Every structure is written in structure tokens, then in C-alpha cells.
Image (tube, grey):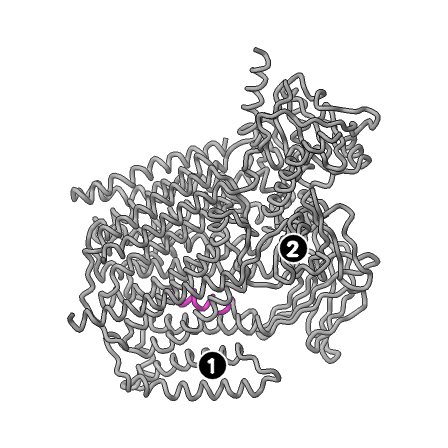
Amino acid sequence: MKRLLLLLPLGLFLVLAAVLYRGLFLDPSRLPSPLIGKPVPSFLLSSTNDSSLSLTQDDLKGSPALINVWGTWCPSCREEHAVLNALAKQGVIIYGINYKDDRADAQRWLKNLQNPYRLTIHDADGSLGLNLGVYGAPETFLIDSKGIIRDKYVGAIDMRVWHEKLEPIYHKLVAENKQ
Amino acid sequence: MIPELGLLSLILALCIAVMQAIIPLLGAAYKDPQWMGLAKSASWGQLTFITFSFACLGYSLLTDDFSVAYVAHNSNSLLPWYYKFSAIWAAHEGSLLLWVWILSFWMTAVSLSGKQLPESMLARVLAVMSMISIGFLLLLIITSNPFSRLLLNTPVEGQDLNPLLQHIGLIFHPPILYTGYVGFSVVFAFAIAALLDGRLDGAWARWSRPWTLTAWAFLGMGITLGSWWAYAELGWGSWWFWDPVENASFMPWLVGAALIHSLVATEKRGTFKSWTVLMAIATFSLSLLGTFLVRSGVLTSVHAFAADPARGVFVLTFLLLVIGGSLTLFAVRAPTLKSHIGFGLLSRETLLLVNNVLLTVAAGTILLGTLYPLILDALIGTKLSVGPPYFNFMFVPTMALLMIAVAIGVLTKWKDTSFNKLKHLLTPILFISFFLAAVVAMLQQRLNLAAVSCVLLASIVILAGVRDIFDKTRHRGLLKGIAGLGRSYWSMQLAHLGFVVCAVGAVLATIGSSEREARMVPGSAIELEGYYFQFEGTRQSQGPNYISDLGLVKVLRDGQEVAVLHPEKRIYPTRQSVMTEAGIQAGFIRDYFVALGEPLGGGAWAVRVQIKPFVRWIWFGALMMALGGLMAASDGRYRMLSRLRSFGSRAFGTQS
Amino acid sequence: MTPIRKRRLGKIFLLVCGVSTALGLALTALQENINLFFTPSQIIAGEVPEGIFIRAGGLVEKGSLVRTTDSLELQFSITDGDRNILVKYKGILPDLFREGQGVVALGKLNQDKVLQADQILAKHDENYMPPEAAHALKEASAANQLTKPLEDNGK
């Protein structure tokens, strides 16, 4: 009886630890996207810089790339933008989805802060964003040469995130493509 | 170069820590004095290397070395030097470094107290502390290296320190708070060492008490500073939010307070042995849990700045080893601990037990409320939050009961107290207190039961303290007797008085606060409780790394100016973030508080004005409690601390 | 049973009583003081009873913030990407309140499904989106993904 009582604190702690362990993986930004392994959803939208140019999912195929969801209304996108510029200079292919934004604002942004994007898709009403399961900006998808989504990162990319999380996968995709 | 040396130094410290965790334990088992003696020099080694590493991070911050990721993320060349320095503990990696640095200080302090302790005890204690050090050094080196570089393209400018953290409070709050948190590792190590040794006697309690008191006092000061910082910086005028991170530091403080009291019973009477050990384990476990909750981002709160499951898994594994291991050891060894000494129903032991139960229940309800959203989310996926009303509903009555227990506890004697004696002591106290409460009730325009009961309880506790002084000195005469009461007695009185002051402040500040929010144009005034807050408009002003709208508000009463306040709205361009700096005039009786909301065009602003009566008492009372703790720790009976003090004065003497 | 044992048993009994009372009280108090979280879609769908305190989260719609000129009353709408609801509030918005950013509003719903907020929370980190707001948007997009193929078929 007394021994049982003395084991009680240990038991309580173990239950607590189990809950905490479960809690660690509840963070919504860490849930894997259901879209991983699936192609980029079909869309027909205009380019942000040229409203007469229409873009579809096929324009994203050909080589592995990042698809970056951004908006001028998103403060952390500004920080991330410099990182994307640096990556683009290194030859990383980046497509942009200008998410729920004003076209004029976005054009000004790209003019003032440089344009790291090979193409920028103008998703004014957020329909493509919704299909991609985007719930905020910035978010970045990694696709392979066939336009299949291979990974996703929620939040602003900095150099550390690039080196530790995204770059290895990107290089793997590039290597796959060469084979 | 310097950052790499910093990391290298951490790795060396880790090697020493591994050595210190193993060899002295073996030494204690085989009674080898040299192996045991290694613990002392190893503690000095860890202190040296971690200090060096700490200095390296400080150097990188002060010299704006933005190639170091931590510096680039948390500093900026325009930042004043003191914020650059305190940025060491502004984010995850650096604050972990601060954690182990403080741990190495505590280890060295314990090793200095060596002469008081049997060699084997000291060796075990230092080994256990070193195990904790290993865990945190590994966490630092593997998952959170503060010295990692941004090699690819070094930014020319840093992202700046989070503006919320640019406050004098930040410079002092984390180091003091951590000193408290980490300090509980000492009593934990003592408990584990004693369990390993199988010897838990009065001596064990006497050795641990000063360390526990010191850690508890620092934790209390840290919490107080945090509360004051939130009050001044968040712009809401609230001093306590029941935010998960606040709760995380408050729980070990509460259980630590229980531990201090049960240690007294164990030291003086040899009772509650296994309970005291359990409390010692619980206090440090809650400190670790606090670290886990903050560092893993499991509970999102105002403070969550590091959300990373990898780190979370690491800390959780570490928790499992430390807490799970020590509780298992407890379950195995505790049955051999027997407290043979009985005590009467009306005795100081009983009252200390009541105190412990109340404090543990308070901490338990806070733990439940803090983790409840997580538990439900984990079990059934419901998203919910627990509001402050829950915490207030549970906490306030518990503290009211605790006040009664304090009053009676002070008047009771060890072993047994006769009911008649107690009645004799208590009757006049109750009489006066009820009389006072009745007077207060009559003076009030609208009867407020909370205020009246608060006055009643406060007066009972204070009068019981005074009554006890008279009772204790009745044989030798008041003046002579007072001189003979001893430092630990006075520190108890001080801490209890602090508790009352804090409680009175909290109740009065809560029920007596008034606030108004209004749209104000320059020259307009609003009235609050007979005071006129006159808004004189704002002007642009330039800080070192921000621009601000600096407002001017005059507080008038009957045409007399009583306060001039400068609320501010700052914009930190680097992070594009806006910060409200409240304009506060502090006072013993009341604070005047003005915060600027948003500009509404045409020079008009949304303005929040508040009058907070007695809000300073909360922090003043909390500091009195902490001071009481420090005073008790420095009691001459615990000579190890006085040795430490003389060492400290020597060390600091040479520095200055 | 010896008197000492009897007394000890009495003490343990008292202790257990005290702790279980406290636990019972705590659980009751918890039940009364939790604020459940709802998304705008759930609110529009009528899942939320009127007159109880809830928390609603989502993104502040761009251009939806409307102030009155003579007081601090204001309104804005929050969206989970699918549906949106109107939030009314009187007072000072937190520093980090921005259009297009996530917020959580604490308050009661009225008959018109307008949230009368007592408190608006925007967290102190500009990279931060309240997890519930993220949750709300996620659910809405998941729902959209389910219905989308049907729409496509209709084309």
C-alpha cells in the first residue's frame, strides 16, 4: 500500500510526459501537407508582372524548383525576400505565388526589392493558395521537374532553414532530374 | 575565430562534465578520496570553460559579428551596448548558455562549501549536478549551437533585438530568474545524493536549506521583475496574465516555498522525510518542466520564441531521464525512510503540513490549468483556452486559507500546543481584526467583500506575528528579548509580512483599478476618479534604433498638477514592429498609467488611461519575501554560506 | 489498531478529502472557464450557441477595418479563407494587429452572428500566427479541397 503511494508521483509524471510528447507534434505548422507527393493543382492565372500573360501548372514543370507564396501585406516576407534573392543568384529556380495581394503593390515590391522569381503567379482571390492548402504567407513548396510537390516549409526561409532543411532535398531533386 | 573558440570551450566543458558525473560517484562508492576530490576541481573547470564560452558570445554581440547567426538574428549595430550584451539571453540558444553558466556557478559554490559536508556527500552532489550539466550542454551543442555561422552570405546588418525585450527589465529578469530555477538543482542533487547514500537525516535538511532559500529568493525576484516588466512594457497595465510561461516559473516558486517549510520540519523534528525529498525533486522537476514548456513551444504564449519539435524531443527525453529516474529512485528508496516522531493535532508540524498541502494544491491547480488545453488537444483534438477566471477562482481562496494557516502556524509550538494557550493568543487578534474589518466595511461607499476579507486576513497575520514577538520575549523583556530572537526568526517575520503586503497589493490593485479608453485630441482631457488626464499631443522623436511619437499627458487634480506622463509609440524599422511604451508615474498609494493606442488622424489618438492603486505593493511584498529568504539563508547557523560570502567579497573586491 | 495508527489514518483521510475537494473544484471551475475555439465557417454554419464566451480566430480581411470618428468603436471581419464573420470591438487594438494577419477575438455572438469582442489578441511576434487561426484556415482549405472536384465536374 505504501509502496503504491510512493509510485504515484512517478506514474503521474509518466502520464504527463506522454501528454507532452503528444503535444510536441500538435503544432499545426508541422503537420505534413496532404499534397506532398501530389502534383501542383491545376490553375489558370495571370502573371503578376504582365496581366496579359496567362500561366498554368505546366509552366512550373521542367526542373526542380521552389514555389514561394508571398504577399506585400506580410512583414516576414520582406525579410525572406533578401534570402530568396540570394538563392536565385546561386541559380536556384524559384516561382512566386503572389497571394491575396494588390497587383500594383506587388509590381512595385518586385521592382524595388529585386525579383528572384522566374515567374510570379497572381493569385488575387487566393484560389490557388486554397488548393495548395496555404494558410498564410510565407510558405514555400519544393517541386520536382514533373511538377510534383515534394516538400513544404511554413514560415520565412532564412539561410539556416535553407541549409538545414530545404537545400538537401533540393539537391536530391536536382540529382534525380539529371539521371 | 572567437565563436569557434566559444564552441570548442563548450565541448571541453562537456568532457569535464562527463568526467565529473562518473568518477566522483565511483569514488564515493569505493571510498577513494582522490576520485571524490576530482569533483571540486572539475567544477572549477566547467565554470572556467563555460565562462569563456559565454564571454565569446558576448564579444561577438558587442563587436557586431553578424556572421554568427545568433548575433544576426538578435542584434543590430544601432542597438545600445547594454542591450547588445543582454541579447546573450534574449533568445533560445543564448538563454540555454546562460542556464548552464549559472549551473556551473552553483556547482562551484557547492564545491566551496565543501568543508561542511562529508566528502562522499559532496562528491555525489557534484556528480548529480554535473549530470544535469551534461544534459544541457548536449542540448546546446547538438540542437542549439549559439555560435553557428551564416557562412553563405553574411548580412551587413542584424535583424535587431525583439523590441519587446529592449527594456531594462530584460537585462536583469532572465539572469535572476534562471539563478532561481537552476539553484533548485542544488537541493535536488542533495536529495538524490542522500537517496543514493540511504541517509536522510536532519543534517541533510540543514545542508540543503540555505541553498533552497537562496534559489527560492532569486526565483521570487525574477518573477517580480518579470511581472513589473510586463506591466511597463506590454501596455495593458496588467501585472499578471496567468500566461503559460509565467505559470511555468510560478509553480516551482510555490512548491519551493512548500519545500522551505517542510525542510524546517525535517531539520528540527525529523518529520516528513520522504515528503521533503519528494518536494525537493518536484521543485527542480517543475523548473525543468518550465524550461521544456518555454523551449519546445508546446504551449504557445506571449513568450514563445522557440518552437522546434527536435529540441522539444531532446528536452523531453532529458526530462524523462532526470525526473523519471529520480522518482523511480524515490519509489525504491523512500520506504526505508521512517519518520518515527509523532506530533499533536494542534502543533507546528500540522500547520506546516497544511501549508505544504495548500501550496502544493495551488501549484497543482495551476499545472492543471496550464496543461488542460494541451491535454484536451492531445486526447480529443478540441481547441480551447483556459481563462484567468479559472486561475483566480482556484488560487485566491487557496491563498486566503494559507494566510490563516500562517497566522496560526506562527503561534503554535513544535510537537503540541494546548488549545487554551492558542485561544488565549488568538482571541485579541481576532477581536481587533474583525473590528478593523468592520471599520473598513463602514468606510466603504459600496461594500466590497473582497477588500474587507483581505483587510481581515492581513490584519490577523500581521497581529499574529506581532503577538508572537511579545510572546517569545515575555520572559526576558521586550528589548532584551528582541535582540535574542535570531536572524532566521526575523527573516520569517519579514517574509510573512511580505506575503501579506503582496496579497493586499494584489487584491486592492485588482478591485480598485479603474480605466478608460478614449479618443483624445490635443488639448482635451478626460476624467477618471476625480483626476483629469489632459492630453497635450505628441511629437516625433528619434531613439537610437527606433522612431517614436512621444506623447505628453498631464494629470491634474483640483487644478493641481500631480503627474506628467510620457507615453510613447515606437516603431522599430528593422523589424517593422510597433511597440507601446506606457507612461507611468509610480507611487506608494497609486500609479498613474497612460498608454497610446493608435493614431486616429488629425493629431488625435486612442488613449488608455488607468489608475492602479497599491500596485507597487505587489512587487514590494514579493521583494520582502525574497529578502526574507536571503536573510534566512545567511543565518550564522549555515556557515557554508558565510564562507561563500567572504569568498564572494574577495572575488568581487579584486575585480573592482 | 493502535491510537497512533488511528490518528495517522485520520490524517491521511483528511488529506485525501482535502485534495479531492480541491481537484473537484478545479475541474468544475475549468469546465466553466474554458473558452472554446471556433472558426468563421463553424460560426456561419450555426455550430455556436449565442451568448456564451467563445474565441474566434482567422485572418483580418484586408480593407475591412472600419472605425468611427468620435469614439473607439470599430469593426473588422475575420476570415478562414472560406467564410468570414464581422467582429465589433471598442477599445485599443494590440500593437501587432494588422490587416492580413492572424488574430483571435474573445467575445460573444449576437443573433446576427456578429462577434461582440471583449478582447483582441495578436501575438507578440510578427512571424507568429495564432495556432488556432492557422487551424481555422487549414480546416477551411481542407473543406475546399473536398468540394473542389465537384465544382470542377460541373464546369
Task: Same chain for labels 1 and 2? Say yes or no.
Answer: no
Q: Residue at x 47, y 52 (%)?
A: B175
Residue B130 % position (x, y): 33, 43
Disc 2 on helix, strand or loop?
strand
Observer-nearest of C133 and B80: C133
Find residue B456 and name its label.
Answer: 1
Residue B500 in the image: above or below residue B78: below
Residue at which label 2 appears: C105
Q: Amino acid at mark 1?
A: Leu
**Which of these two is toward me, B133 or B58?**
B133
Q: Is residue B235 visible?
A: no
Secondary structure category for the residue under label 1: helix
The chain carrying label 2 is: C
Q: Is residue B643 above or below residue B44?
A: below
x, y percent for residue A142 = 61, 26
Question: Distance of mark 1 from mark 2, alpha carbons?
Answer: 39 Å
Q: Which residues are magenta?
A: B619-629
Specify few, some or many for label 1: CA neighbours under 10 Å numbering under 14, 14-19, or 20 or more: many
Is A30 part of what is drawn in magenta?
A: no
